[in-house]
Amino acid sequence: MKRKFFIFLPVLALLASCGNASDGSYKPGREYGDDGYYALYMLNIARGNSTSESGLDELVENTLYLKVDITDKLGQPLEEPNPAPTRENYDFMGWYKEASGTNEWNFDTDIPYSSVILYAKWGNGSEEQPYQEPEYIPPERIIEDMDFRITDILNKPLEEGKNEVNLTAGGIKRLATHKENVKFAIGFEHRVGVDVTTATYDETDKNISVTFSNNESVTIKVNDITATLKVDNSYYEGKAVNYEAKGGDIENYHIALAGSSSMENWDTSTEDMAPIVSFNHGIGGTTVEQWTKWLLERLVMPYSPKAVVYYVGVNNIINSSDDGKITADKLDALFDKTHQYLPNAHIFYVLINKLPLYGGFQNDFDIANNSALEYEANHEYLTCIDAGKGLLKPNGLPHFGYFKTDGLHMSRAGYAIWGAAVKQAIIDWLG
């Protein structure tokens, strides 16, 4: 019988240094150590069993399989690790450039010119089929008192007593992009057998024309209220405008990722979440109330997500002097408003990570996190994700190797674990 033991890879200590050289300048590619450049080979599994080079079974406490100093070998092909990692009931399929396993690294032709991270890809064999995101079918809203009733456009209710709707630039961009067919934007209740047959958008008159199968039609006036929802920070406002300008092609019923810098900096989220389709509208530095007051309506609602994943609140505590209780109350308000306007969407809240250099705030982090867990216990539409637990040492303290030198933002190795936990929570919900 092979012996089992815990292995704590000392090389991870080197991961704590990243980004800035001793003279304060930034050195591209040196995120994993100012003293050189590295190739990191990630197991791409969270705390699983693998086989070491010695042939012993290891219960690894992270996803790093091998770290190779390539400082003196930049511009030359990498040597493929030998032996390859193994995983019970899985086939090793090779080393890939992203965790989703889309683009394989070619050890003959691909050349590193800075530090690189490669991810193991695992085949599920004959026992399991690769995960496929199930089709989402929104629930119908059947009524009997009339043939139909238009209730909202892109989740924004019509103005009371009027055939008018107040939309932001993101929603209007979606309408303009698909102006010949905007049926996806129409929220309505209807009698059995009555449905929308056509819906078009006139950019000049800013009207939506809707016809129903009973030959009745309705015209909805669209008002642009973006100016009333400008963020109280010009830098954040610029990022919001950029998302709105690029969001016309986002489809309905995908996963919205929202929140502050840990979400925005997850620049591999599209690949890491695959095959689940997601879009990331995170803005670094934002607070809970900025999402509640302005950004929810602009960067989440117009895209009709089937689920919203928030990571926000840490800036309230660290930068805005909100204590844990105030932050918790603001989170409750964000959850309430999200559910009010997106009643069919599930809400995920990623609990605030334990942070290497911010232990003095931990009590407030805990208060906010525990409040979110209490909200979850009383509202079936909220699920909390403790993604940060994978970034901890066995003693419960945060592992600096999973964070950048600021002790606040995660490194690539950290996102490999944190992002996998977020994805798994979504899969568990989707079924």
Image (cartoon, rainbow, N blue to C red):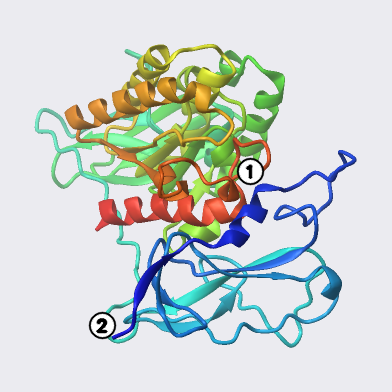
Classify mark 2: helix, strand or loop: loop
Residue 171 seen in the figure: yes
- Alpha-carbon neighbours of circle 1 within 10 Å: few (<14), some, or many (≥20)? few
Classify mark 1: helix, strand or loop: helix
Which residue appears at 58% of the width and 29% of the height? 169
Residue 268 seen in the figure: no
Q: Nearer the viewer, residue 278 or 186?
A: 278
Three-letter amino acid code at the position of disc 2: Glu
Mark 2 or mark 1: whose residue is earlier in sequence: 2
When the figure is inspected, residue 323 is found, relative to residue 94, above or below; the finding is above
Camera-near label (2 vs 1) is: 2
- In the picture, residue 413 is in which quadrant? bottom right
Query: Where is the N terminus found, in terms of image quarters?
Result: bottom left
Three-letter amino acid code at the position of disc 1: Lys
User: Horizontal and vertical percent for residue 112?
Assistant: 78, 72
Q: Mark 1 — residue?
A: 246
User: Horizontal and vertical percent for residue 361?
Assistant: 49, 22
When the figure is inspected, residue 366 is found, relative to residue 264, above or below; the finding is above
Q: Nearer the viewer, residue 10 or 206?
A: 10
Horizontal relation, residue 78 to residue 404: left or right: right
When the figure is inspected, residue 250 is found, relative to residue 167, above or below; the finding is below
Q: Mark 2 — residue?
A: 127
Q: Nearer the viewer, residue 271 or 115?
A: 115
